[in-house]
Amino acid sequence: MMFQDEVCMGGKANGALLRQQIEAIMPQQQPIVIDFEGLSLITQGFCDEFLGPILAHNGQDILRQIKFKNCSDGVQAAILSTAHRFLSDAQSISH
């Protein structure tokens, strides 16, 4: 998956669209590569909406199936923040 002609990606609606695309191919494609080339920033809302529910439903093992490529510092920070929050929340619920 790639982002074309974008420098910053934001919005919960855009995040939900990406999540739906990922969920549609998860059963048949491994690994799933999300290429952030040319994208310097994603908003936290976008990241929470695309990655958060995937982590909440599948746990951290899903990160073996999803690969993030060409992440700028800003993109990486948003992904790590979302992963930390959603995985911490899931662990606190299961204990």
Image: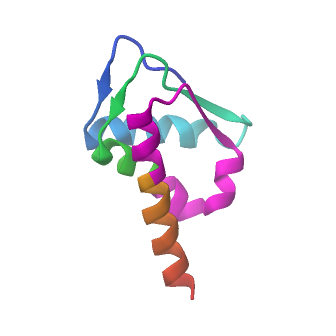
Give the residue drawn at x 63%, y 60%. Answer: 60
Residue farthest along the left direction in this orientation: 11
**Residue 94 image position (x, y, % from top left):** 56, 83
Classify the position of the C terminus by image quarter. Answer: bottom right
The residue lying toward the viewer, choosing from 78 and 17, is 78
Main secondary structure found in the magenta portion: helix
- Residue 81 lies, with reference to residue 11, above or below; the image says below
In this image, 8 relative to 91: left or right?
left
Q: Is 38 located above or below residue 47 in the figure? A: above
Is 81 positioned to the left or the right of 22 in the image?
left
Outermost residue to the top? 5
In the displayed structure, does residue 93 sit left or right of residue 7?
A: right
Task: Look at 64% across and 50% down and name the residue there.
Answer: 63
Count numbered badges in the picture. 0
Task: Please give the range of residues in magenta.
Answer: 52-80
Which quadrant: the N terminus?
top right
Extreme residue in the bottom direction: 95
> How are the colours assigned in the image?
rainbow
Question: At 49% from the left edge and 82% from the top edge, which residue is drawn?
Answer: 93
In front of the other: 15 or 20 = 15
Query: In the rendering, at what x and y percent does residue 91 appear?
Result: 55, 77
| Residue 77 painted magenta | yes
> Which picture quadrant has residue 85?
bottom left
Location of residue 82 in the rendering, given as x and y in whole percent from the top left corner: 42, 55
Where 5 sits versus 61, above or below?
above
Q: Residue at x 49, y 71 (%)?
A: 88
Q: Position of residue 31 (x, y in %)?
A: 72, 36
**Residue 6 placement, left or right of 31:** left
- In depth, the one of 39 and 16 nearer the eye is 39
Tell me which corner region of the image, top left, top right, bottom left or bottom right, holds residue 29.
Answer: top right
In reply to whether residue 1 is colored magenta, the answer given is no
